[in-house]
Amino acid sequence: QVQLVESGGGLVQAGGSLRLSCAASGRTLSSYAMGWFRQAPGKEREFVAGISRSGSSTYYADSVKGRFTISRDNAKNTVYLQMNSLKPEDTAIHYCAARVYAGAPSRQSDYDYWGQGTQVTVSS
């Protein structure tokens, strides 16, 4: 079993940047494919980005493609989400998740472990 803790959220102006981190403990992160999801107030949780176990493959929602970058450092047991050119519509609680088995990077039900989330607020 793995425990996930997100950090790096906060308040930023539109056009600004943030880097979220997801630190894993309990098991080595290289055992898991990872994903970032977000939930805005009054909306369902949605996929943001995913990365394979080795980091060789990445996946993005259309809404963040070209602005966000997912990466991982398995030696540090950490996954990152670099968010640039932030927009007010990016405001949400952002969650990282770990997937044990092969599955669709964007399908929430394929993920086995979730963090508690970190708030990102983008002001206009």
Image (cartoon, grey):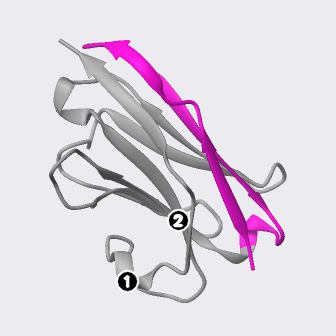
Q: Determine if residue 104 is in view.
A: no
**Callout 2: 10 Å neighbours few (<14), some, many (20+)?**
many
Q: Which residue extends farthest front?
A: 42
Residue type at numbered disc 2: Ala
- For this rendering, which residue is in front, 11 or 71? 11
Relative side of 21 to 25, left or right = left
| Residue at image mark 2 | 97
Residue type at numbered disc 1: Ser
Asked if the magenta segment contains residue 8, the reply would be yes
The residue under the point 21% across, 45% down is: 41
Number of on-image labels: 2
Relative side of 76 to 31, left or right = right
Residue 101, image x and y in percent?
A: 55, 89
Pointer 2 or 1: first along the chain: 2
Q: Do residues under tags 2 and 1 come within 8 Å of each other at their CB atoms?
A: no
Please identify the quadrant where the N terminus is shown. bottom right
**Callout 1: 10 Å neighbours few (<14), some, many (20+)?**
few
Q: Report helix, strand or loop for mark 2.
A: strand
| Residue at image mark 1 | 109
Above or below residue 115? Residue 119 is: above
The residue under the point 42% across, 84% down is: 110
Q: Report helix, strand or loop for mark 1.
A: helix
- For this rendering, which residue is in front, 65 or 35? 35
Residue 105, image x and y in percent?
A: 39, 72
The residue under the point 17% across, 33% down is: 89
Q: Determine if residue 43 is in view.
A: yes
Relative side of 25 to 85, left or right = right
Please identify the quadrant where the C terminus is shown. top left
Above or below residue 111? Residue 8 is: above
State the extent of the magenta-drawn residues as a range. 1-30
